[in-house]
Image (spheres, grey):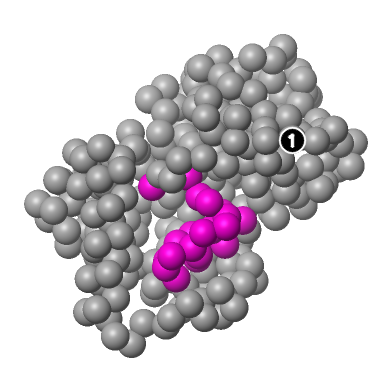
Amino acid sequence: MARTAERINPERFDTREEYLLYLRHRFAYEYAKSCTRPTDEAIEVGSGEGYGTSLLSEAAARVVGLDIDRATVEHASAKYASDKVRFELYDGNTIPFPDNTFNLAVSFQVIEHIRDDTGHVAQIHRILKPDGVLVLTTPNRNYRLLPGQKPWNRFHIREYDPEQLAATLHKIFPDAQVLGIRGSDQVQAIERARVAWALKGGPMSAIRRSLPEPLKLLLGDVLGVVRKATHPGSPARDFLTAYRLDDFHVINQGVEESLDLLAVCHKAA
């Protein structure tokens, strides 16, 4: 699968920040597994590399992963498909399953990419069975953006604060609950420093956003080398053992301080 800035490769971590981002996303899958019963039919909308869909199959009866990129679906199918897991291509708008098909749906780090966010949520609601559950994550704009600022990630249509995400979800899931994923104090500080670095990019950030993906990644690698040179106290590759999933936890108070917003949405019977 081609490397991109938006798809995590769980076998390659060049920096501590990349590894912490992976752990943060992996934590969300572990949370979703805790909401899953062994008889559940599950779907991941926006399955990416496929490792998360495979993880969900450890708790569910069967899992389908949907993605809009053919090469990504082919990669995931070759690496993770089994009797319990399959991957399918979809158009990014209409989920190709009948109403009331799945017990559980997950959509992690996807809604910020979709222009019709309400339509995205409505499609998931449609294919959930009565009493089905949607678990959704998205970055918390409160620590990433200045008030009124557009996302510096060029792939993001918008980013949400807790109130904005709740307002969007409540149109379709009236009882949706917006929680947060928070890191340890050290993890929070590392992520805030990463975002501060991005925000300080100024004109360079604008140039980077406009570049083709391969050049964008190359520039990101160069900037990473520069950042390491200017932060000589940064830890080396021992980050692979220094941080674990239990460096993250779910919060229901002070959600404004979270790294990611975590929504749990129940479909009414």
Using residue 6 as the reference point, say whether residue 262 is left or right of it: right
Image coords of residue 73 (percent x, y): 59, 30
User: For numbered disc 1, what is the local secondary structure?
Assistant: loop
Of residue 188 and residue 56, the one placed in the foreground of this image is 56
Name the amino acid type tagged 1: Ala
Left or right placement of residue 186 versus residue 127 in this view: left
Q: Which residue is mark 1?
A: 81
247 vs 89: above or below? below
Q: Is residue 74 above or below residue 263?
A: above
Magenta stretch holds residue 131: no
Can you say whether 183 is above or below 27 in the image? Answer: below
From the top left corner, tell me how far across and down residue 25 is, in percent: 56, 54
At horizontal 51% and vertical 59% (from top left) the residue drawn is: 12
**Residue positioned 74% across, 35% down in the render:** 81
Rendered position, 115 above or below 97: below
Q: Residue at x 79, y 42 (%)?
A: 57
Q: Quadrant of residue 31?
A: bottom right
Please state if 17 lies on the left or on the right of 63 as rendered: left
Front residue of 166 and 92? 92
* Res 231 visible: yes
* Viewer can see residue 123: no
Judge the density around disc 1: few (<14), some (14-19), many (≥20) Cα neighbours within 10 Å. Answer: some
Specify the quadrant that holds the C terminus.
top right
Image location (x, y in percent) of residue 230:
22, 79
Query: What segment is highlighted magenta in the picture?
Result: 5-26
Depth check: 259 or 256 in front? 259
Seen at 60% across and 18% down, the residue is 95
Q: Position of residue 128 (x, y in %)?
A: 72, 24
Classify residue 114 by image quadrant. Answer: top left
